[in-house]
Amino acid sequence: MSNTVFTTDELEMPCPECKGKGEIVSHGKSTSCTKCEGKGVIMTGLGQTLLHFVKKHL
Ligand SMILES: [Zn+2]
């Protein structure tokens, strides 16, 4: 796999809701971020397109 077409930055980006931490801290308690499901990253439009394509052809 030496020929990388996409970088991960193009497929996912840090979640703006939790700032990439995957959890939201409020009132001293941390809860898993619902927007990114605790992953800390959310998929970009290109990432979704690629995932859709991969699922379709597997
Ligand atoms: Zn998040």
Image (cartoon, helix red, strand yellow):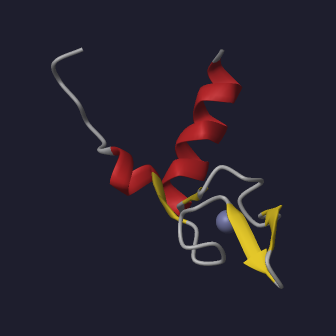
Q: Quadrant of residue 41?
A: bottom right
Count of marks placed on residues: 0
User: Which quarter shows the N terminus?
Assistant: top left
Residue most extreme to the front? 28
Residue most extreme to the left? 2
Which residue lies at the image location 66% right of the left edge and 40% below the top edge? 52
User: Please, is residue 28 above or below residue 36 in the view?
Assistant: below
User: Which quarter shows the C terminus?
Assistant: top right
Q: In this view, does 55 lie to the left or right of 53?
A: right
Q: Quadrant of residue 29?
A: bottom right
Nearest to the observer: residue 14 or residue 52: 14
Nearest to the observer: residue 27 or residue 34: 27
Q: Is residue 16 left or right of residue 35?
A: left
User: Please, is residue 1 above or below residue 3 in the view?
Assistant: above
Q: In this view, does 37 lie to the left or right of 40?
A: right
Quadrant location, ligand no. 1? bottom right
Which residue lies at the image location 61% right of the left edge and 38% below the top edge? 51
Nearest to the observer: residue 30 or residue 35: 30
Which residue lies at the image location 79% right of the left edge and 78% below the top edge? 28
Residue 37 location (% of width, % of height): 77, 54
Residue 57 location (% of width, % of height): 63, 20
Residue most extreme to the bottom? 27
Q: Quadrant of residue 2?
A: top left
